[in-house]
Amino acid sequence: MLAIVATIRGNVIAHKAKKLAVKINDQQQELIVYKQRTDLLEEIDKQQAILNRLATVTLQKMASGNHDKNSESYKRLDNNVSAVNHLRSGYEKQRQLAYSIEKGASINANERNLADIRRLTLHLEQEIENELGEIKG
């Protein structure tokens, strides 16, 4: 009889432990989602700030009047403005995608998205440095 009580008690404890483990796992998954969402939103906003800076630098160079409208440098600047406008237009869509991350979503896919955004941001920062270097140079 004592063995049956001990077995039942053991099963109850095991069941409670399993419920607790599931709850902890769910909370961990939720934290991962919040972290990924926060990282993506932060990087998206950083990228928008850099886009604004690139647009400012580019438009200042264009307004300086030192470029013939048929020159290669003017065409490059015009392409920069077009690219900036295109990237800016996707801002809200990027934010919506970040907010749509749900528990159980592919962590690897979200990490790849973040890496892609960071790579583009670095490229934009380099483009700003190139433009500023030409102004100073």
Image (cartoon, rainbow, N blue to C red):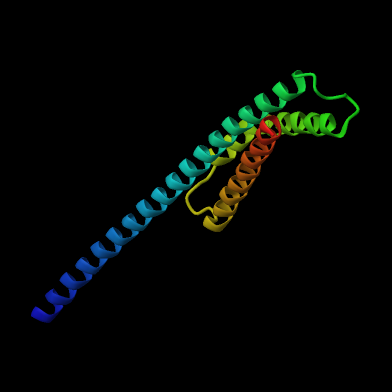
Compared across the picture, whether 117 is left or right of 61 comes to left
Q: How many marks?
A: 0
Residue 33 at x, y percent in the picture? 45, 48
Write down the quadrant of residue 62 in the picture: top right
Question: Which residue appears farthest toward the left when viewing the image?
Answer: 2
Q: Quadrant of residue 83?
A: top right
Tell me the residue at 83%/29% (across/down): 74
- Please tell me which residue lies in front, 86 or 16: 86
* Front-most of residues 96 and 8: 96
Q: Nearer the viewer, residue 8 or 74?
A: 74
Give coordinates of residue 91: x percent, y percent. 62, 32
Which quarter of the rendering shows the N terminus? bottom left
x 64%, y 42%: residue: 126
Task: Name the residue rendered at 69%, 34% in the picture.
Answer: 137
Inspect this view and state whether residue 54 appears: yes
Q: Is residue 96 left or right of residue 27?
A: right
Residue lying furthest right? 70
- Evaluate whether residue 1 shows in this view: no
Compared to residue 126, the image places residue 132 above or below, namely above
Q: Pinpoint residue 77: horizontal percent, then vertical percent.
A: 78, 30
- Residue at screen point 53% across, 53% down: 105
**In this picture, is 65 found above or below 11?**
above
Left or right, residue 112 beside residue 2? right
Where does the image place residue 7, in percent across and percent down from the top left? 18, 76
Residue at the extreme front: 137
